[in-house]
Every structure is written in C-alpha cells, then in structure tokens.
C-alpha cells in the first residue's frame, strides 16, 4: 500500500532527525478500528537509543513528522507510546487503482534483490509411493519457494534423491523377492523390507516385459537390475504424483553423484585442512562442539564406512559452491535433533550461521468418519499422497496442508476437506472469489473492463467497504512478512479474513442498479484480484463458479 510506504519513509526521516538513523520502521493495522488505520511501535523501539521515555519519543516523532497535506485525518499517541494514524479517505481508497494497475503482480516485491536461495523439500527415498507426510512437506516447501519468488529472491526448488543408502538395498531385495513370488516360487520379503502391493505390481510388469527368464538370473545380477528398475520406477511414480500435486522442481540431485564426482572426499579434506577433524578409537571425528553442537560427531567409522552426516555435509557444501546464499531444507519431524549438528558442520566449513535454515514438518493423521485412516492396501502401511488428493482434490489437500505451521501436529479431516460448506476454509475462500466473479457475470461485463478512472470512489464509505479497502492494502506486507518468516499459513489466514469481509459485504449491499454501482464494481474487481493472487501464490485454483 503506497500510504504505508509514505508513512514508513516519513517516520524513518523523523527518527533520523532525532538521532536514530537507519531505524527499522514496523507498521501494522490495529485490530480495533478505534485505534486508527495504521500503527507503529517505533517510539518504543527507539526509547533506549534516544534515552527517553517512549511517550516522549512518540511526541517528538509526531512533531517532527512531515506528511503530505491531507494525508491523515489525525494522529494519536496511545498507551506506552504507540502512534496511531487515521488516514484520509483518499488514501484508503487509493489502494483500488494500485491493485488494478498491478493485477497479478499485486503483493510482489523486490526484497530479496535477486539473491540465490535453494529450497530443498520432499526428498523422499525412492523406495515407494509418497505418503501424506511427504505431501505436507511438498506443500510447505512449494509454499515457501513461492513466497520467496514473490519477494524477489532467485529460487531453485530442489529434490535430493537418496539413491546410495541401505534402504535402496532393501528395495532391491524386496523387489527380487516379489519377482520370485510372481514366478511361482517360494520367497520372503526380507525383514525391514517393503511389503506393499506396489512392488508386486512392479514385479508383474517386469516379468511381462522381460519374460519369466528374468526370475532365473543369478541373484547378484537380479538384485542389481531390480535396484536400477526399482529406483527408476519409484522416482517416476513420485514425479507423477508431485506434478499432479502442482509441485515442480528445478533440480533433481542424486546422492550417488556426491561419490561419483569425489565431493565426499573433497569435503573431508576441506574439514581436515581447516583443523576440525581428529582421529580417535580408529574413527574420524568432526569437532562440532566448537560450533555449538552438544557433542562431537563421527564422520568415518572404524570399518571405513561413512556416517549419514558425511554425504549431507558434502551435499550442502555443493549447494554453497553453486552460489546459493541461503539453503532452506524442509525435513520430517524425526530429523529435529539432526539440525544442530548440520549447522555446526557447515560453520566448520566457514559458512555464515544463517546459511542453512531447516523447517520441520510434523506427522499427519488422516481422519475419515471420525476414525483414523492408517494405511492403504497398495502401500501396506501408510496413506499415500495420491490416495488423499484423489479423494479430496488437489486444491483442498494443498490448502489444508498449508493452513497450519509445519512444526505443529496436524489432523487432516477428509470429510471437512470434501464438504461444500462455510466450515471448509478452502471452499469458503474460493466461494468468495466466485461470488465476486458472479457479480460481473450478472452485469454481463468482463472484470477487466472495469477501471477506476473517472469513478467517484469516495462513495465507498460503508463500514464493510472501508474494512475491505484496508484489508486489501495489507496484502503486500502480509506476503513480505510470511516470506521473511517462511510461513505460508499466514497467507491462508489472511485469505480467510478477507473472504469473511467479502462475504459479509456481498450479502449486505447491492451492486448493480445502485448509485454506487461504478465504485462497487471497482471494489469487487479488486477483491477478486487479491483473492486470486493469494490463492495463486499457494498453488490453488481461483474458480469463477462453485
């Protein structure tokens, strides 16, 4: 909102005149309209620096403030030193031309200034279908990447394929056992292997294509080929699910490349060169306690094999060498304790403390009919992402995954997600967009033909109209705040609030045939645009009919 920019600049200048240059000016919309349209706590923030009481600082700021004539109706100092601004009506309605001029770009900014950031998410082992936990991580990672895109960062979405671990060995052994079973022979899936019917389906496909002679291959050769086929098949299925879930990746990085390109050895050499490794009990250790970890960590075990930490360090070193200034990883809740050691290891490489940021995603419980759904026949022990979004629709699945903090436990209510009622938040928001669109359909006008030029917008003076104007003016700052905090759920919360006001306005006031028709059409078009922008940011459709 331009009014916010004007206020922010004027307050920063006033603070500088008082001796506080470079002040960080935070503006917010008061929850109570009686406290004005915009408020700031700047006086409280500067009180210590200026060695004065907050209310005294507030008074000096207001006295020093230089605003354009007619910009505000009044300015009040409240409580311990908050400054509340009551904007002139022209400033409130000025948001409408700004929204319509920006269109699909309203809410975007250049805060990131093109700095490179890597967002790695999902990164599921290629051992089976994606489960609902992966789906939550996919929605969160994609939402974070979109927020950073919208605020001017150069974002790379990345998927890390763990194709070099023991789980891949179990996949090969499980698939080989299924091949033997389909060929009519006695064979058992190994302990800790993969029991789902998806491997039986794959084994049937292998024999249909290769012939039953495939089952007669020497076990080593059969396992090798099952490993290759299994990984390729599961990755293809995961990609197909993610594409339908509207998640795309710019980079697919294989763990095996770290070894093939010598990146693991290079990383160990670098850590040793920096003096942060030591030998003890026949193992190679990393002195992570020097960088905030609670204990030192083993890199190479006595038998010469590497711990999981080694390729992970090498992988993030590779991210840094690709020029990324930030690396944001979305990990499952079982990795919570792993974060400090990774951050310590990267600090040992000389990287800034804020280079790696980890977002934790907690487990998802799926409920239907008041009972928990624990698994599907095909997967054997979990609910797959595809099971979920094919039942609820992609819009509902994405929205529900995004409407809570990732690190909070989440219960996914399938019945609610499928319902077409106001209790379903995604339906409620999409219906608000459809209702705004419906106004133009009844008027037999395309929304794009409505513009504010020559329209008296001052007639938009009803409480709900003023509330809509002020709420829409907040959208750019909401997006910026959500991006800074890496919290897409702030957008869903905002959209539900805007939809609530829009529904109330729609039910209370007529648009067509009223003296305020021209102005209200402009308002409806702007509300429609902001709702569409928020939904689009989250990868959710903005339907014109419901």
Image (cartoon, rainbow, N blue to C red):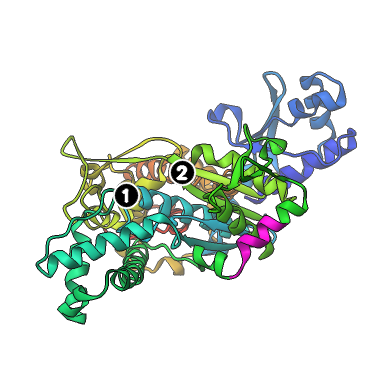
Q: Is residue 91 left or right of residue 220?
A: right
Q: Return the mark for residue 485.
A: none
Q: Secondary structure at mark 2?
A: helix
* Residue pointed to by mark 2: 489
Q: Residue at x 55, y 56 (%)?
A: 119
Q: Residue at x 71, y 58 (%)?
A: 269
- Chain part drawn in magenta: 261-269
Q: Is residue 301 left or right of residue 403?
A: right
Q: Residue at x 52, y 56 (%)?
A: 120
* Front one among 439 and 275: 275
Q: Disc 2 or disc 1, which is closer to the eye?
A: 1
Membership of 264 in magenta stretch: yes
Q: Return the mark for residue 132.
A: 1
Membership of 231 in magenta stretch: no
Q: Position of residue 495 (x, y in %)?
A: 43, 46
Compute the Cα span from label 2 to label 1.
Answer: 18 Å
Mark 2, Cα crowd under 10 Å, few <14 / some 14-19 / many 20+, is: many
Q: Is residue 82 above or below residue 195?
A: above
């Amino acid at each position: 909102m331009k009014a916010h920019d004007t206020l922010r600049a004027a307050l920063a200048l006033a603070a500088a005149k008082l001796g506080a240059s470079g002040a960080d000016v935070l503006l917010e919309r008061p929850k109570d309209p009686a406290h004005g349209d915009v408020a700031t706590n700047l006086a409280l923030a500067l009180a210590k620096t200026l060695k004065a009481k907050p209310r005294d600082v507030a008074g000096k700021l207001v006295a020093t403030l230089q605003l354009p004539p007619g910009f505000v109706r009044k300015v009040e100092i409240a409580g311990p030193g908050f400054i509340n601004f009551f904007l002139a009506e022209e400033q409130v309605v000025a948001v409408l031309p700004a929204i319509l001029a920006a269109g699909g770009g309203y809410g975007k900014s250049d805060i990131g200034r093109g700095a490179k950031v890597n967002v790695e998410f999902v990164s599921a082992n290629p051992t089976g279908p994606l489960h609902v936990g992966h789906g939550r991580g996919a929605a969160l990672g994609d939402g974070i990447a979109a927020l950073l895109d919208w605020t001017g960062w150069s974002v790379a979405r990345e998927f890390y394929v763990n194709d070099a671990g023991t789980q891949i060995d179990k996949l090969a052994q499980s698939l080989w056992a299924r091949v033997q079973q389909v060929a009519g022979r006695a064979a058992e899936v190994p302990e800790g292997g993969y029991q789902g019917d998806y491997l039986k389906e794959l084994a049937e496909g292998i024999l249909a294509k290769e012939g039953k002679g495939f089952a007669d291959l020497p076990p080593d050769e059969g396992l090798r080929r099952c490993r290759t086929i299994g990984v390729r098949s599961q990755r293809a299925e995961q990609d197909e699910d993610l594409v339908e879930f509207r998640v795309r990746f710019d980079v697919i990085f294989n763990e095996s490349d770290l070894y093939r390109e010598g990146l693991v050895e290079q990383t160990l050499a670098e850590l040793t060169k920096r003096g942060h490794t030591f030998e003890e009990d026949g193992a190679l250790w990393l002195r992570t306690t020097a960088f905030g970890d609670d204990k030192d960590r083993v890199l190479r075990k006595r038998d010469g094999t590497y711990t999981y930490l080694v390729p992970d360090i090498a992988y993030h070193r590779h991210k840094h060498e690709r020029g990324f200034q930030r690396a944001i990883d979305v990990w499952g809740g079982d990795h919570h304790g792993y974060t400090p050691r990774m951050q310590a290891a990267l600090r040992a490489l000389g990287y800034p403390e804020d280079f790696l940021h980890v977002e934790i995603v907690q487990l998802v419980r799926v409920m239907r009919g008041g009972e928990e759904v624990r698994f599907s026949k095909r997967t054997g022990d979990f609910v797959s992402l595809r099971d979920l979004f094919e039942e609820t629709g992609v819009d509902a699945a994405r929205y529900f995954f995004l409407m809570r903090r990732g690190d909070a436990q989440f219960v996914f209510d399938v019945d609610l997600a499928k319902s077409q009622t106001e209790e379903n938040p995604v339906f409620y928001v999409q219906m608000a967009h459809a209702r705004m669109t419906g106004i133009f359909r009844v008027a037999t006008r395309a929304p794009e033909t409505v513009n504010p030029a020559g329209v008296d917008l001052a007639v938009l003076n009803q409480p709900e109209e003023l509330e809509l104007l002020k709420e829409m003016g907040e959208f750019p700052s909401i997006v910026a705040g959500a991006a800074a905090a890496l919290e897409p759920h702030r957008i869903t919360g905002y959209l539900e609030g805007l939809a609530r006001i829009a529904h109330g306005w729609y039910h209370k006031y007529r648009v067509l045939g009223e003296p305020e028709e021209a102005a209200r059409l402009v308002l409806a078009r702007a509300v429609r645009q902001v709702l569409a922008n928020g939904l689009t940011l989250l990868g959710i459709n903005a339907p014109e009919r419901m």
